[in-house]
Image (tube, helix red, strand yellow):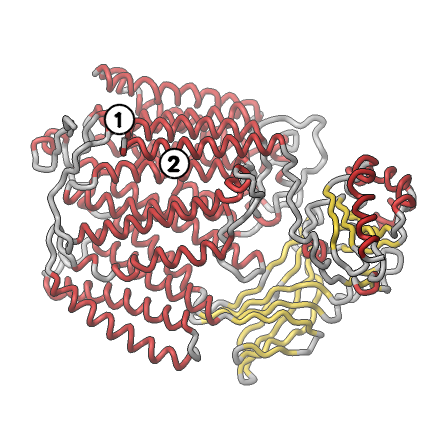
């Protein structure tokens, strides 16, 4: 199949996106059922053509069609087939195509599952999804064509960025995009609700699993990216507050807030405007992330090729989508705080504080990320604020969240009994204090580690107490519905994550050493013995591979093989060796030979001992699992036909206040 | 009005981003002020290109100012810069030290044989690790290092006769005045 067919498929998809974005919205406005009915077939057709374009590009990679510029730039004859597939999204044009494909997957799922929604509402939701697709398809067609030809055709291509030649990196972008793009569903719901002028609790209930699932994917994507940075970059770190990382973290924070705000709106009818605003923010920040990464406005270690034309296009798109949504919000958001009233001591208050902290944290990350740009604008020079800024402010903002977390589930909606709070605080507090005192002896007064133990026990005991309460008070089968189980898992994930962060940050040991073969270095009770370096070959790289034997009390614990790879185009890439464990990681990165001509001699090595580091990703995975389990709750799927819900108590009439 | 706030804040952001794009098109994005200027050059120990057995260190070059010029045989812009260096190197009045960056030593030697060498000394950083300490953005780049080993001036991209006359020579004169 020729690549030109790919271009054609994209143009056809674009036309269908226009049909999907424009006609159903007009239909919903004029009450024309024929126009509304265009939405589903147009969405399906668009997905077919985008999948076709994606398949054609993947096929071009598989059969080494170097006459396609994008293929020639990102692969070569020695690249194994699985990395040639991953190379489809290895650079700007292809990753954009993947973005659109995933948007289509979400849209098709939405089209298939939205039959229970009122027809007008479903048409509006799908129409908004179509409008988003128009923007991205126009972007790819006009500025980032992946099918451009390269003539004359080279005999061999360049290479996929070696940084991306890693299993973790092949699935990190698709999963991350599933999260980013997944927020488009909640976004489309909000815009549709604003257009229609009604926010029904039943619709919010229907939107909740989509938000939870998108957030779960985003969590997994971030965890994969963090784990990859740790295993691959050889710096031993797992988070760098890099602009691109921040771009994925901001929607995550807002998404976490949105999940809780949606719960209030669905169950109590309150906070409707805030829920709408958060849905707009979550997707806007996903778009913003794309803009920051693709426009080259900010420089970052992820350094994608930047092109001012692309930057202007995305900025215009961003201005229309986000600016338009926020203007719509300003004009049509419900003006009266609806919902049932609540007292100070109530679940609403706890969720609100958590929401406020998460949203503030997202704003704080945004400010820090944009700081270099602000510096330019105010003639202060390009200043980066970097980890010191984030490292100070983020824990401060999250402290109230962690402190409140055990109470949330115990509090009743509306008006809670303060007595149960004292009970929980007493039990969790005593447990946390006791564990912290014991821990203090082991970690020799490292305050951060002690705080980590205390915070973890505080949260974990709170979560377990609540699980226990449900076990005692409710009959079998009603104790842990999926929504409840998901919440408990995700909150437990927070406890595990906090342990990982604080303990690994405070107790890690790093030694930069020069070792000759046979020499050893002692770290935290382990002896790292360097056994020399030899040459190894991979499919498209050669490497110096070190052998490091780790011993404890004379017994071999691990034999590790850190590598320094040189790829086809002379790009050098370190492959750290990690011996993973539940309570500690041993980590070795190979530096440079002391004498460049004698690789058999002494080498510079970087040796780490990292306790509890795995808990960081373990906590993240628990949170992800929580998101997915919640999304699977049957309550969200129970039939709620429009007619029924409109008559039921859940319906809230459009709020037009005279003020 | 309160409801308009998110919109207005966002429009402020759009303005900022528009400025960012405008700034990047009008300013050289490569102009990243080096945090190393005025600071001691990083310690290094690199082999000579012609005699890989011999190591040149930062300490061994102390005592007089010199210009460290990052180049590579694979670098197109370096070929552009090369005739300028051939013509003007003597005029600088200080030693010119070549810094061969991420290059096969054989290629670099061949390149210098073919085009001629403007350098008094060439050191090779094949893995490019030391270049990270210097904050090398790409080749070519030039660092003026004074007698005490402090970086006094940095230029990213090819040196041109204009840059040499307007920026480099005054910087050299200043470096010599302070530490002859």
Residue A354 vs A549, above or below: the answer is above
Which residue bears the numbered disc 1? A331
Q: Is residue A88 visible?
A: no
Image-quadrant location for residue A390:
bottom left
Please state which of the two labelled residues, at mark 1 or mark 2, is closer to the viewer.
Answer: 1
- When the figure is inspected, residue A205 is found, relative to residue B18, above or below; the finding is below
* Distance between mark 1 and mark 2 Cα atoms: 18 Å
Residue A172 vertical placement versus A442 (above, below): above
Q: Nearer the viewer, residue A209 or A5?
A: A209
Label total for image:
2
Q: Answer with left or right where residue A484 lies relative to residue B55.
A: left
Q: Which mark is residue B35?
A: none
Q: Residues within 10 Å of mark 1 (few under 14, many from 20)?
A: some
| x and y percentages locating residue A507 in the rendered image | 47, 72
Residue A578 lies left or right of residue A572; in this view the side is left
- Taking the image as shown, residue A405 lies to the left or right of residue A560, namely left
Of the 4 image quadrants, the one containing the N terminus of chain A is top right
Judging from the image, mark 2 belongs to the subunit labelled A
Mark on residue A284?
2
Residue shown at the point (55%, 52%) measured from the top left? A166
- The answer to whether A214 appears left or right of A589 in the picture is left
- Disc 2 element: helix
Locate the C terminus of chain A by quadrant.
Answer: top left
**What is the chain identity of the residue bearing mark 1?**
A
Q: Can residue A486 be seen in the rendering of this structure?
A: yes
| Residue at left offset 46%, top offset 47% | A368
The residue at the far front in this view is: B177
Residue B3: x and y, percent?
27, 32
Q: Residues within 10 Å of mark 2 (few under 14, many from 20)?
A: many
Q: Position of residue A613 (x, y in %)?
A: 45, 65
């Amino acid at each position: 199949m020729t690549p030109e067919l790919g271009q054609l498929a994209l143009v056809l998809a674009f036309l269908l996106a226009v049909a999907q974005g424009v006609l159903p919205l007009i239909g919903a406005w004029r009450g024309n059922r024929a126009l509304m009915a265009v939405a589903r077939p147009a969405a399906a057709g668009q997905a077919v053509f985008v999948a076709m374009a994606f398949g054609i590009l993947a096929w071009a990679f598989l059969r080494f069609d170097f006459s396609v510029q994008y293929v020639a730039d990102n692969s070569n004859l020695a690249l194994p087939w699985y990395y040639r597939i991953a190379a489809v999204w290895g650079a700007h044009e292809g990753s954009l195509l993947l973005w659109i494909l995933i948007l289509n997957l979400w849209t098709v799922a939405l089209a298939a599952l939205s039959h229970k929604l009122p027809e007008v509402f479903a048409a509006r939701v799908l129409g908004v999804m179509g409008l988003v697709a128009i923007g991205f398809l126009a972007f790819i067609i006009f500025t980032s064509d992946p099918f451009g030809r390269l003539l004359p055709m080279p005999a061999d291509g360049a290479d996929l960025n070696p940084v991306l030649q890693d299993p973790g990196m092949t699935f990190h972008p698709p999963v991350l995009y599933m999260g980013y793009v997944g927020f488009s569903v909640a976004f489309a719901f909000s815009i549709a609700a604003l257009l229609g002028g009604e926010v029904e609790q039943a619709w919010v209930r229907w939107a909740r699993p989509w938000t939870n699932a998108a957030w779960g994917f985003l969590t997994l994507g971030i965890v994969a990216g963090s784990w990859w940075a740790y295993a691959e970059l050889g710096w031993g770190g797992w988070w760098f507050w890099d602009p691109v990382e921040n771009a994925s973290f901001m929607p995550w924070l807002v998404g976490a807030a949105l999940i809780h705000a949606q719960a209030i709106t669905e169950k109590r009818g309150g906070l409707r405007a805030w829920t709408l605003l958060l849905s707009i923010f979550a997707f806007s920040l996903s778009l913003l992330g794309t803009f920051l990464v693709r426009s080259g406005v900010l420089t970052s270690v992820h350094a994608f090729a930047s092109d001012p034309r692309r930057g202007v296009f995305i900025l215009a798109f961003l201005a229309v989508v986000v600016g338009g949504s926020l203007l719509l919000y300003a004009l049509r958001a419900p003006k009266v705080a609806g919902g049932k009233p609540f007292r100070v001591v109530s679940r609403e208050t706890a969720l609100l504080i958590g929401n406020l902290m998460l949203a503030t944290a997202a704003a704080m990350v945004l400010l820090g990320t944009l700081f270099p740009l602000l510096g330019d604008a105010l003639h202060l020079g390009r200043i980066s604020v970097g980890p010191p800024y984030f490292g100070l402010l983020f824990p401060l903002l999250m402290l109230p969240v962690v402190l409140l977390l055990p109470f949330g589930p115990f509090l009743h909606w509306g008006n809670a009994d303060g007595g149960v709070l004292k009970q929980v605080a007493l039990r969790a507090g005593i447990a946390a204090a006791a564990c912290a005192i014991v821990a203090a002896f082991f970690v020799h007064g490292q305050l951060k580690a002690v705080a980590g133990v205390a915070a973890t026990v505080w949260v974990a005991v709170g979560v377990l107490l609540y699980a226990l309460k449900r076990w005692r008070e409710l009959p079998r089968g009603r104790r842990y519905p999926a929504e409840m189980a998901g919440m408990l898992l995700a909150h437990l994930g927070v406890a595990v994550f906090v342990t990982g962060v604080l303990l690994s940050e405070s107790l890690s040991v790093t030694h930069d050493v020069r070792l000759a073969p046979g020499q050893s270095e002692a770290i935290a009770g382990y002896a790292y013995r360097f056994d020399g370096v030899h040459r190894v070959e991979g499919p498209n790289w050669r490497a110096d591979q070190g052998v490091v034997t780790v011993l404890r009390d004379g017994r071999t614990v691990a034999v590790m093989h850190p590598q320094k790879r040189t790829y086809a185009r002379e790009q050098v890439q370190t492959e750290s060796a990690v011996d993973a464990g539940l309570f500690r990681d041993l980590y070795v990165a190979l530096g440079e030979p002391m004498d460049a001509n004698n690789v058999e001699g002494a080498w510079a090595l970087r040796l780490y001992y990292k306790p509890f580091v795995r808990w960081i990703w373990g906590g993240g995975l628990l949170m992800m699992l929580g998101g997915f389990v919640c999304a699977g709750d049957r309550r969200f799927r129970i039939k709620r036909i429009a007619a029924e819900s409109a008559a039921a108590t859940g319906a809230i009439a459009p709020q037009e206040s005279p003020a | 009005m309160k409801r308009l706030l998110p919109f207005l804040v966002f429009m402020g952001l759009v303005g900022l981003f528009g400025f960012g794009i405008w700034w990047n098109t009008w300013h050289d994005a490569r102009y990243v002020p080096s945090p190393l200027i005025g600071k001691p050059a990083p310690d290094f120990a690199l082999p000579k290109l012609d005699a890989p057995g011999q190591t040149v260190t930062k300490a061994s070059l102390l005592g007089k100012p010199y210009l460290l010029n990052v180049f590579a045989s694979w670098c197109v812009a370096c070929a552009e810069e090369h005739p300028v260096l051939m013509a003007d190197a003597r005029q600088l009045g200080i030693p010119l030290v070549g810094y061969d960056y991420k290059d096969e030593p054989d290629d670099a030697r061949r390149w210098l044989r073919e085009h001629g060498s403007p350098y008094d000394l060439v050191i090779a950083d094949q893995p490019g690790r030391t270049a990270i300490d210097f904050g090398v953005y790409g080749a070519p780049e030039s660092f003026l290092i004074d007698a005490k080993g402090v970086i006094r001036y940095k230029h990213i991209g090819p040196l041109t006769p204009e840059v040499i006359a307007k920026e480099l020579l005054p910087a050299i004169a200043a470096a010599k005045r302070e530490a002859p």
